[in-house]
Amino acid sequence: MYRDGVGDGNLAIVYEHEVELMKKQLKGAYGYDVKFTFIIVSKRIMTRFFLNNDNPPCGTIIDDVVTQPER
């Protein structure tokens, strides 16, 4: 499941409420615990890889972790 429109300050709230409710609803529908993936999409990315604040050209692969650990 993809979820958009979640600010950094609301990540814990979304997990505690929406993910738990989804688990409950899926169990009610199928009668057992269903495994699913919940992905929060963030579009406001301000990561810069060069000192002059230019992003690399399209298709550039950054082969390292660039996200926050709590995501």
Image: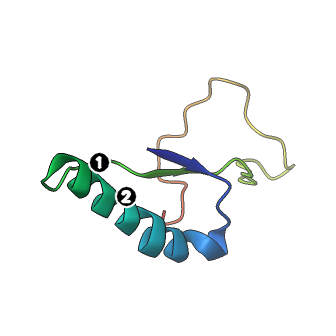
* Residue located 70% across and 24% down the image: 58
Outermost residue, right side: 52
Near-viewer residue (33 or 55): 33
Near-viewer residue (9 or 65): 9
Q: Which is more N-terminal, label 1 or label 2?
A: 2
How did the renderer colour the structure?
rainbow
Tell me the amino acid under the disc marked 2.
Met
Q: Is residue 70 visible?
A: no
Query: Residue 22: which disc?
Result: 2
Mark 2: few/some/many CA within 10 Å (<14, 14-19, 20+) = some
Q: Secondary structure at mark 1?
A: loop
Q: Residue 50 in the image: x percent, y percent?
A: 76, 47
Mark 1: few/some/many CA within 10 Å (<14, 14-19, 20+) = few
Q: Report whether 50 appears left or right of 67.
A: right
Query: Residue 36: which disc?
Result: 1
Mark 2 vs 1: CB contact within 8 A:
yes
Q: Residue 3 in the image: x percent, y percent?
A: 55, 50
Q: Report whether 27 appears left or right of 65.
A: left
